[in-house]
């Protein structure tokens, strides 16, 4: 299935962003560990969160989380500490290519019983849950922050607590701090000093919890605002957030997009002034913004060098390779001179029509390329429903903003409902 997208008559509008799946998934694990029945309000309705909810609610011995990376990491740690649990944890073919060895090794340091059922270091896993004994462990800092967050989330239930020393440069630190912040809100005794984190043994409190809107989802609206003259009101988006991707507001200011917060949420709009100089930025703390920033810069004819994004190669797709191949269809010749960076120096290549963007089964590819309809007469997005992984209402929200979307199966315009 493909969507044809045009943007000839866009306008300002109000948008209700999805709830943060990062916060939702952490809160769900914490609630399960606390054996709490307290509600989580405004819980994310995306595929990843639904997958995690189903796994936590179903007492199965075989759990397939498909392509939900957060669920794979968090459930590996969660099952490891459930005494009497015996479960096989697997996922999609792509998930079985995404490493999980560093997390398994860290869990084994505190007594977890986990076996690789296929290639060592990768899912599927067989996990025998049991009591874990605290100690001082080391983990590399340049791995996925979800490995570290998974260890932290179960740490209050490890006997004698745990001390984690992160070795070398720490990537995606804002996600680790998000995890610590949420744990503290649930009563955990956790502190971080530099690369050292200590968690004391103290169970979580059973409390109701509210999830804030997703700043990564907001990034696509910042991109759209940077490419037209419309303003967008993003309901309930907080001025102060645990999410590292809230930095999109300051990055977008370089494109001349201002952010104003009030009781409604945030209003974002182009100010008419912007910095057109080449953008050099390190996104090791906010890698999920890389696709949005790269495509917005290119569509604005702004050269860029994005560094610190080596982990993009092991996401839902190899996002660096995917960006290079799909941007070329729009005439932008991206390159990756090093494994951890993406560069565009203004080099152009021939555009081949019709422009059909392959999402590479990656939700962020679909959403970061959709704003290109503001610069091209039309674009096509192949496999558009991958957006349900994090932002199920994305296409409907584009319709609210005046985009036109045609379904190639029936040639009819999709209407906003």
Image (tube, rainbow, N blue to C red):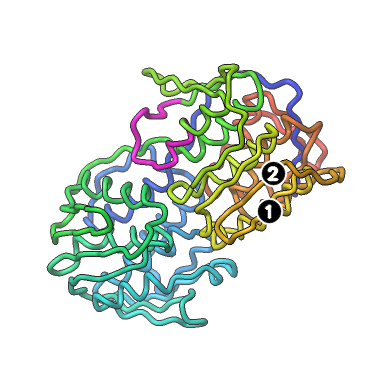
Tell which circle, 2 or 1, labels the residue nearer the N-terminal end. Answer: 1
Q: Position of residue 154 (x, y in %)?
A: 26, 62
Residue denoted by label 2? 345
The reply to whether residue 84 is visible in this rendering is yes
**Considering only vertical position in the picture, is 217 above or below 102?**
above
Q: Position of residue 320 (x, y in %)?
A: 62, 55
**Considering only vertical position in the picture, is 75 above or below 30?**
below
Residue placed at 39% from the left, 58% from the top?
Answer: 145
The reply to whether residue 74 is visible in this rendering is no
Q: Is residue 148 magenta?
A: no
Which range is magenta? 235-249
Within-10-Å neighbours for mark 2: few <14, some 14–19, many 20+ = some
Are the residues tagged 2 and 1 within 8 Å (C-beta)? yes
Residue placed at 41% from the left, 48% from the top?
Answer: 22
Residue denoted by label 1? 335
Q: What is the spatial separation of the Cα atoms under label 2 and label 1, in whole angstroms?
A: 9 Å
Q: What kind of element bears circle 2?
A: loop
Q: Is residue 243 magenta?
A: yes
Q: Residue 361's quadrant in the figure?
A: bottom right
> Of residues 144 and 336, which is closer to you in this image?
336
Q: Nearer the viewer, mark 2 or mark 1?
A: 2
């Amino acid at each position: 299935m493909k969507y044809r997208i045009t943007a000839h008559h866009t306008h300002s509008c109000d948008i209700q962003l999805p709830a943060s799946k990062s916060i939702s998934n952490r809160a769900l694990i914490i609630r399960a560990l606390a054996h709490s029945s307290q509600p989580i309000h405004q819980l994310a309705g995306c595929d990843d969160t639904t997958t995690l909810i189903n796994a936590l609610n179903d007492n199965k011995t075989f759990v397939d989380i498909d392509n939900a990376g957060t669920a794979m990491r968090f459930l590996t740690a969660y099952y490891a500490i459930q005494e009497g649990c015996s479960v096989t944890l697997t996922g999609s073919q792509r998930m079985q290519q995404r490493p999980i060895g560093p997390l398994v090794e860290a869990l084994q340091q505190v007594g977890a019983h986990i076996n690789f059922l296929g290639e060592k270091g990768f899912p599927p896993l067989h996990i025998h849950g049991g009591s874990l004994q605290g100690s001082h462990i080391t983990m590399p800092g340049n791995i996925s922050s979800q490995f570290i967050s998974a260890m932290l989330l179960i740490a209050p239930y490890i006997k004698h607590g745990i001390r984690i020393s992160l070795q070398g440069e720490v990537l995606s630190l804002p996600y680790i701090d998000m995890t610590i912040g949420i744990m503290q809100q649930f009563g955990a005794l956790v502190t971080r000093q530099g690369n050292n984190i200590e968690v004391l043994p103290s169970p979580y409190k059973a409390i109701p919890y509210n999830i804030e809107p997703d700043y990564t989802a907001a990034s696509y609206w910042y991109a759209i605002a940077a490419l037209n003259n419309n303003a967008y009101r993003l309901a309930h988006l907080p001025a102060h957030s645990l999410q590292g991707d809230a930095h999109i507001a300051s990055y977008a200011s370089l494109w001349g997009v201002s952010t104003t917060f009030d009781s409604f949420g945030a209003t974002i709009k182009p100010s008419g002034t912007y910095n057109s100089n080449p953008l050099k930025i390190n996104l090791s703390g906010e890698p999920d913004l890389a696709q949005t920033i790269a495509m917005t810069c290119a569509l604005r004819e702004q050269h860029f060098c994005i560094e610190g994004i080596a982990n993009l190669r092991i996401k839902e797709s190899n996002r660096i390779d995917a960006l290079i191949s799909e941007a070329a269809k729009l005439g932008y010749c991206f390159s990756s001179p090093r494994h951890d960076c993406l560069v565009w120096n203004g080099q152009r290549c021939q555009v081949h029509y019709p422009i059909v963007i392959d999402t590479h089964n990656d939700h962020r590819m679909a959403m970061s390329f959709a704003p290109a309809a503001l610069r091209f007469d039309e674009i096509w997005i192949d496999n558009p429903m991958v957006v349900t992984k994090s932002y199920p209402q994305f296409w409907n929200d584009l319709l609210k903003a005046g985009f036109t979307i045609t379904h190639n199966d029936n040639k009819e315009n999709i209407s906003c409902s």
